[in-house]
Image (cartoon, helix red, strand yellow):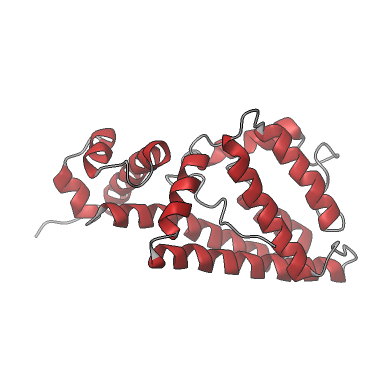
Amino acid sequence: MRTVDPEQHARKRARILAAAAEEFAANGMDGTSTARICRRAGIGSGTLFHYFPTKKAIFHALFADDLARTAEIRDRALAADDPREGFALLFDRLTADFADPQAPGLIAAALLQASRDEKFAGLLGDDEARTLAALTTLLGRLADRGHRPAFPPPRAARWLVTLVDAVYLAATDDGFDPRAHAAELREVTAWLTGGAVAPAGAAGTPGASETAEAPEASEASEASGASGASGASP
């Protein structure tokens, strides 16, 4: 009986998803074929279909993996003894891909797919609901420690998600500057959270240039950008 090396299996799966992310970001769901993914990944079609039965399954897996990492960060944020640390952890996760060149294309593809794919829309909707709940909880804990948000925690959480989404959606605009947008969002968030997040450039916090460099650490993620815009609005 043939045995499977779990590490080799995981590496090949990640390679397929990384290739798919590049194709989906550049060409969208409809403009991407499994043949293009195979060529970019350097594999045959038989290998691809051993891992994923359809192109839609690849697309779903790409985002599901990324959202699973977000879920881990949410759990860690909620478990943090200091709500400021927990909030910063989740905020950094939500804004990690501002400078990722794949993010705009993947977000556009995700929004289109969600409009016609109920299962995929449910995947994104569940993640957004859980993120809003986590932010609301953390903002409530911060308020108990003197960092009162500008609005009640549920409304402040909704505004935060909307603002993060807006930055990702603006990434295709002429003149988009991820450093400036990240720094400005941090300023707005500092006000919105009652100072729970230090403004960009404050001692011990990332400045505008550092904020933009942080996303580079997530380049290994095969679904970079997938945790960004969800279409939420206040």
Give the image location of residue 49, x and y in percent: 19, 52
In the displayed structure image, the side of residue 82 where residue 111 appears, left or right: left
Give the image location of residue 222, x and y in percent: 42, 44
Q: Quadrant of the N terminus?
A: bottom left
Q: Nearer the viewer, residue 108 or 129?
A: 108
**Does any portion of residue 82 appear in the rendered image?**
no
Look at 65% across and 44% down and name the residue there: 167
Query: For the image shown, how many numbered marks are present on the structure?
Result: 0
Residue at far top of view: 175
Q: Is residue 138 above or below residue 88?
A: below
**Does any portion of residue 65 appear in the rendered image?**
yes
Q: Quadrant of residue 177?
A: top right
Q: Nearer the viewer, residue 171 or 145?
A: 171
Residue at far left of view: 1
Q: Nearer the viewer, residue 28 or 208?
A: 28
In the displayed structure image, the side of residue 95 where residue 23 appears, left or right: left
